[in-house]
Image (cartoon, rainbow, N blue to C red):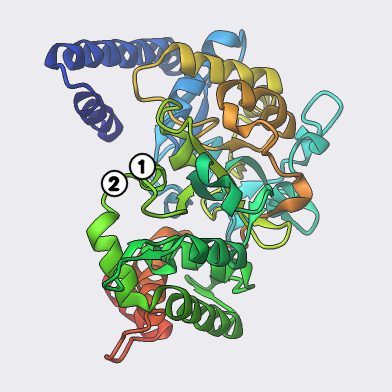
Amino acid sequence: MKNIFRIEKKLLTAHRSPLTAICCLLTAHCYLLSVICSLLPIILLTSCGTSSPVVIWTDRPEMVSYVEFFNVAQNKAKAVVVYKEKLASSLPPAKDEQNPDIVIGSFLRNSRIKKNFASLDRVFNRRGINPDSIYAPLLEYGKINGRQYLIPLSFNMPMMIFAQKNHDLIPESMTIDPDRIRDSASLFNQKSKENVFLRMGYAPSWDANFIFHMAKMNGIDFSEKGNVFSWNAYSLADTIEYTKKWSQDKNGGTSQEQDFAFKYLYAPSYKLVSSDRCLFAYIKSDDFFNISSEQTENIAFHWLGKGDKIFVNDDMTSLGLYRKTKNSHSAYEFINWFFSEATQKNLLERALRMDLDTQTFGICSGLSSIKSVNERVFPSFYKTLLGKMPAESNLVAPLPLPSRWESLKERVIIPYLSEVTSTDSTVAIKSMDERIAAWRNQFN
């Protein structure tokens, strides 16, 4: 229900005309009713004991539409969806809950992976999934001691966007690293006679998530340790020093970067780079491709990387077979159906046909883990991806992370990076360890 209200809000705010908004809401509710009706026969079959649908736990709302399509397309196996907002923390199920058969979501790769999931090696056979069809570094992410416990389903990557008219200031490449961003941005800088910035190419203090990705590229190696995480202290120190030097040498310090942001950076990122106030903006691929193509037709992008390596965002979506499933045969049918180029092409086409201003980017709001889908199918729907998909050797998968990683990142890491990289800080800054201790006391 929470997602239904979210859809309603988006529909109401997306249309200026009240009549148009009401019509879209009615259409959305009719669609939701059709989903419920499509599941009723499955529920009735289960209650009569004549059939057992595949139970899918997920934190991806898009799976409702996918499962509806699966139930229509398949003659034998059927499936139902149970939405879990905090999926990774929901395993194992409570005693009074029905066990899932399949689990689909983020942050499933942790120390409890073998306790939660069964091996999926059986799906990689001549009648099932070809392992070579999936990006190798992402597939390796789901392995333990050579056995496959998770299969990557979709992923996103960090991007730097810029106006096409400024392409001559930016090196021609598929990826761009912090050094090139810094140097190109400084050439774009412009000051008034009063020595006040009128244009600023880019500032790391504008988005601590950018600094977070710089730390990953510098080898900080955030990884699960107990119920929190460990990191490389030397890499963190290097990242802090690099960021502060960039801010000071190119932009006059953090205070000037923040003054400029306060004056000018209040519009969406694609508008900022189009307006020539700044050269670059940092954005996640799912956020960028959810913007309409009409609004981004004059926007170009490079993947944020270091050398030829691009660090995939931590919230990569994976699929696992729950260890205590009693419906593995039907679960395998769903898995084989989903990891098919033809299926995923149909899902993308279906999302386009059912346009209610609520569809999300790609497959489960991301790029597909199937190489051929990204290379052959996605460019038909997202023109700017043509010729921009990196090779599998370019991708770096996340390390195992705690199930509550999003909370730790939001409440511990991002605030710390924002404060510790400031060139103007005059007060004592709490260490990462102190912040982790405070997080434990407040949220555990």
Image point (42%, 66%), residue name: 203
> Within 10 Å of the Cα at label 1, are there few (<14), some (14-19), or many (20+) other Cα atoms?
some
Identity, as a three-letter code, of the amino acid under mark 1:
Lys
Q: Nearer the viewer, residue 279 or 78?
A: 279
When the figure is inspected, residue 424 is found, relative to residue 81, above or below; the finding is below
Residue 10: % across, % down: 26, 29
* Residue 94 can be seen in this image: no
Confirm or deny contact between disc 2 and disc 1 (CB under 8 A): yes
| Residue 327 found in image quarter | top right
> Within 10 Å of the Cα at label 2, are there few (<14), some (14-19), or many (20+) other Cα atoms?
few
Q: Which residue is mark 1?
A: 271
Q: Which residue is mark 2?
A: 267
Q: Quadrant of the N terminus?
A: top left
Residue 389: % across, % down: 68, 39
Is residue 60 shown left or right of residue 193? right
Q: Nearer the viewer, residue 340 or 271?
A: 271
Residue 419: % across, % down: 35, 78
Q: Quadrant of the C terminus?
A: bottom left
Q: Residue furthest left?
A: 18
Q: Residue furthest front?
A: 193
When the figure is inspected, residue 292 is found, relative to residue 140, above or below; the finding is above
Q: Nearer the viewer, residue 13 or 261?
A: 261
Residue 81: % across, % down: 44, 28
* Residue 300 can be seen in this image: yes
